[in-house]
Every structure is written in structure tokens, then in C-alpha cells.
Image: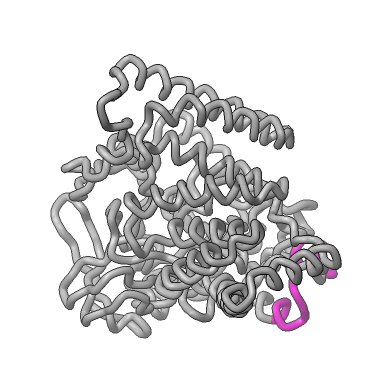
């Protein structure tokens, strides 16, 4: 079955797994299989005044809607483009006296669209909103309580003159948002800024080692091929980060998405040996020593989170250094507890402009990631990019340029050449290439010029470390 703009994929159903998507033709790494605009989408409550409600870009100065004083836009173009979806919301917010939470706003936008266009298949959609999975039957007591509260708040917000929908459909919509709401990130792809419903993308099943990735680019979600895909192959995406043990990923998937993962990597526990690696050689540590160091690592990560929340970054660095001293004689280079510590240490040290120490940790982190992640993984690409920038700032131009080139090759596949972050990386690649040539011609002159440039222009400060991980695929409460 194919639909407008969806000619290259087919919807299919299997026993046990339900619906899925298959390729109708061959795709190569980096190909866009399809791009889908949101059926409905909203900005997170905490960011409604700094993110455009149409294109989801972060802007310094936004225009505010003169009527409801709630919606914000880049300019008149974005405001006009939003009017069809904002019109009912605008008058409802004025009537209600304030804007409700993101879930209520998203449910309202979905139902206003259903009111406008009717139920059933929308243009370009493979599946109707009413047919999407809601998993309400699998909800625990806490989730059922939240659902009832959301439905109650929705009914208070929904204007009496609008079409009145049944309780079953309203509950279904909240269930769909809970398990099928996709995270929208800002133009740099670094921060989660909103949530949207994409009916076609919802049909892609999970695999811990997928053949596709999802990226939000220029107002649409793109499904991109990560490896060669043949006609008839199922199209899969990963709902969780791969950098966890198979048992942890399965637990997370069961808790958040209500299914048991049966992918090859989970069944065979592939890469778990690398993620639990201990130092090899004659002085192999005892099982008790390993257990002790892993417990210390877990305790330290909790202390680090607290110190980061309070902005005590020098304390974070001290905790990382102390923990790494204990980890290094015991844990292998690909052990996830060591890699997590290296990642935090390199990020925080870069922010504090201690670039040489940060570069050393970043290099070791990337070496470990390269053995664990799929070669075309978006998180791997971003980590390699950060390591490259850290080396460049440390004056290690050869390693810096090499890492930036490697990151650029990955992001061309995962994000594509038109994504803002890939464009930024291309500028860095050209700049570091020019500096590398200068370095190779005359090392002494290169360092003299670099020193002079740094005196005149301070190194751009790295973004403040965040406790948040990279935006996950689905917007789902932990």
C-alpha cells in the first residue's frame, strides 16, 4: 500500500509485532526514504517564549501573537503559516484565561484538525489517527491517573461551540501522544524543544541496530537510510540509545513502549562483552574488585548529577578525575561506566576551557564509541564532532581536523548536507584544513599566529554542560 509522497514504502502487518514499514525500492546510506510534516505539533511549556511555534527554531527575538499573547513566531511569514492551526487555539486560550500544558495543547490541535478534515485517512498518511496504537490498556495506575487528569483539563479547555468528541476518542488521543509523540529538536538538533505526531513514522518498528535514523530538519521529520536497504527489507529505527546493556535497553523498552525487544543484538547480547570489559592481561582484576568499581561509578554519577544541577563544575571535574583513577586499572577501554565518565569529564573541562585535558578524555571516549556504535550512528557523529572541536581548541590541529572530517562523513548520512549542524561542520572542516596546511608548512609560525589570534579574540565558550542527554526519538516520560 502506498500513498502520496510515500511511494517508496509499504505498510505491512505481522503476527506479534503488528504494523511495520517495508522498502519498495533500494536505498543507500544517507538517502531520505521519506520526509513527513507533523499532523500536529507544539512547543514544550518551558520554551514557549524562546522557540518559534511554527518552525521550532530558537530565536533571540520572537514576535508574540497580539491576540492570545502566548504563541511566538520568527516573523510574519511563520505567523501566517501558523494561523490555520493556531486560530482555534488562540480564541480558546483567551476564553480559558491561560494556555494549558503541552499535552492538552497537542490533543486540542489534533482534534481541531479532525474537526476540519474529518476522521479517516489524511492526505499523505498511511494510517488514520484513530488507528494509531495508544497502549492505554497497558497503562499502570500512575499513568491512568495522569490520563484522567489530562482528559479533565482538556474538557475544561475545549470550547463548547466546537465539535464535541466522545470520551473514548479523547482518551485514545492522549494514549497516542503518550506512546507515539515524537521529540522535535531545535535547528541545531541539540535540544528537545517540542513534541509532534507523525502517523507514518509511528509505523516504523524498533531495532537496537536499525537500518534507518530519524532527524528533524527544516520543519519535517526525515527517515534516512543508515545502511544499504533492499526492496522488501523492513525499515527500522531505534527508540533508545544503544549505549546501554541489552538487558537495560529491554527493560527501558518494556517500561516505556510496552514490548519485549527481540532484535538480534538483544537476543544474542551482542556488544555486551565490550560494554562490560575489564582490564585484560596478567593482573586481571577479581570479580569483587570489578563489582566494587562499578558501584563506585554509579555512586559517583549520582553525585555528578547533583553537582551539575547546582552548576558546581569544578566539583564535577574533581569527581570525574577521582573516579577515573579508580576505574583505569580495573575497567576495559570500552566499559560503559568508564565511557560515561570520560564523556562528562571532556564536556565539562571544555566548558571550563581546560582543552588539553578535555581532548585526552574525548579521544579515549571516541575510541571506545567507535568499537560499540553502528558506524553511521547520529550520537556517535555528534560525539566525534565535539571531540574534534575540543582538539582544535587545544591547538591539536592534526587530530582536530581528522576528527572533524570523520564527524562530517557520519553527519552527511545521519543528518544530510542541508541540516544546519552539517553546514556548521563543513565550515569547521574548511577552516581546520586551512590551519592544518599552515601548520604543516611552518609549525612555529602557526603557533605564533594562533597565540596572536587568541589574544585578540577569546575562544568561543563551549555551551554550558547540560544534564539532559541528546534528544531521544520519542517524547516519553522516564
At x 32%, y 68%, the residue is 226
At x 42%, y 55%, the residue is 180
Q: Is residue 323 visible?
A: yes
Part of the protein shown in magenta: 64-80
At x 22%, y 56%, the residue is 18
* Snapshot colouring: one colour
Q: Nearer the viewer, residue 255 or 247?
A: 247
x and y, in percent, of residue 60 in the image: 80, 66
x and y, in percent, of residue 82 in the image: 66, 75
Residue 77 is inside the magenta segment: yes
x and y, in percent, of residue 355 in the image: 65, 51
Residue 384 is inside the magenta segment: no
Measured along the vertical axis of the image, is residue 318 above or below residue 18? above
Q: Quadrant of the N terminus?
A: bottom left
Measured along the vertical axis of the image, is residue 25 above or below residue 142? below
167 displayed left or right of 445: left
Q: Residue furthest top?
A: 288
Q: Is residue 219 visible?
A: no
At x 68%, y 69%, the residue is 444
Q: Quadrant of residue 422?
A: bottom right
211 displayed left or right of 32: left
Q: Quadrant of residue 466?
A: top right
Q: Residue furthest left?
A: 15
* Count of marks, rendered view: 0
x and y, in percent, of residue 87 in the image: 69, 71
Amino acid at each position: 500500500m502506498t500513498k502520496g509522497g510515500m511511494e517508496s514504502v509499504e505498510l505491512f502487518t505481522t503476527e506479534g509485532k503488528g504494523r511495520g514499514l517495508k522498502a519498495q525500492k533500494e536505498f543507500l546510506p544517507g538517502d531520505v526514504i521519506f520526509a513527513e510534516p507533523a499532523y500536529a505539533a507544539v512547543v514544550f511549556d518551558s520554551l514557549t517564549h524562546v522557540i518559534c511555534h511554527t518552525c521550532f527554531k530558537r530565536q533571540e527575538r520572537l514576535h508574540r501573537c497580539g491576540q492570545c499573547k502566548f504563541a511566538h513566531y520568527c516573523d510574519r511569514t511563520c505567523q501566517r503559516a501558523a494561523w490555520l492551526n493556531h486560530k482555534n487555539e488562540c480564541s480558546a486560550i483567551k476564553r480559558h484565561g491561560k494556555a494549558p500544558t503541552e499535552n492538552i495543547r497537542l490533543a486540542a490541535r489534533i482534534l481541531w484538525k479532525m474537526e476540519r478534515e474529518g476522521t479517516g485517512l489524511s492526505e499523505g498518511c498511511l494510517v488514520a489517527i484513530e488507528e494509531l496504537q495508544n497502549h492505554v490498556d497497558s497503562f499502570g495506575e500512575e499513568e491512568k491517573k495522569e490520563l484522567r487528569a489530562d482528559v479533565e483539563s482538556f474538557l475544561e479547555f475545549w470550547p463548547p461551540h466546537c465539535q464535541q468528541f466522545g470520551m473514548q476518542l479523547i482518551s485514545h488521543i492522549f494514549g497516542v501522544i503518550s506512546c507515539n509523540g515524537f521529540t522535535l529538536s531545535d535547528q541545531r538538533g541539540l535540544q528537545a524543544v517540542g513534541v509532534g505526531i507523525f502517523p507514518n513514522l509511528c509505523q516504523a518498528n524498533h531495532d537496537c541496530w536499525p537500518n534507518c535514523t530519524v532527524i528533524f530538519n527544516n520543519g519535517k521529520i526525515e527517515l534516512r537510510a543508515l545502511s544499504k536497504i533492499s526492496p522488501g527489507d523492513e525499515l527500522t529505527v531505534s527508540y533508545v540509545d544503544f549505549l546501554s546493556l541489552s538487558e537495560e535497553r529491554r527493560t527501558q523498552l518494556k517500561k516505556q513502549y510496552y514490548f519485549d525487544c527481540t532484535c538480534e543484538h538483544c537476543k544474542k547480547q551482542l556488544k555486551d562483552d565490550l560494554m562490560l570489559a575489564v582490564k585484560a592481561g596478567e593482573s586481571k582484576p577479581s570479580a569483587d574488585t570489578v563489582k566494587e568499581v562499578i558501584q563506585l561509578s554509579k555512586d559517583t554519577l549520582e553525585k555528578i548529577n547533583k553537582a551539575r544541577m547546582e552548576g558546581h563544575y569544578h566539583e564535577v571535574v574533581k569527581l570525574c578525575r577521582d573516579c577515573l583513577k579508580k576505574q583505569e586499572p580495573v575497567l576495559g577501554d570500552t566499559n560503559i561506566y568508564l565511557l560515561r565518565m570520560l564523556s562528562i569529564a571532556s564536556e565539562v573541562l571544555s566548558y571550563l576551557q581546560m582543552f588539553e585535558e578535555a581532548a585526552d578524555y574525548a579521544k579515549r571516549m571516541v575510541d571506545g564509541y567507535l568499537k560499540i556504535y553502528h558506524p553511521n550512528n547520529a550520537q556517535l557523529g555528534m560525539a566525534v564532532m565535539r571531540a574534534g572541536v575540543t582538539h582544535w581548541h587545544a591547538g591539536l590541529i592534526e587530530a582536530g581536523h581528522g576528527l572533524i572530517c570523520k564527524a562530517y562523513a557520519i553527519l552527511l548520512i545521519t543528518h544530510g548536507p542541508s541540516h544546519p549542524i552539517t553546514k556548521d561542520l563543513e565550515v569547521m572542516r574548511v577552516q581546520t584544513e586551512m590551519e592544518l596546511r599552515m601548520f604543516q608548512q611552518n609549525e612555529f609560525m602557526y603557533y605564533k599566529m594562533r597565540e596572536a589570534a587568541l589574544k585578540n579574540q577569546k575562544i568561543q565558550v563551549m555551551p554550558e554542560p547540560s544534564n539532559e542527554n541528546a534528544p531521544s526519538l520519542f517524547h516519553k516520560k522516564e
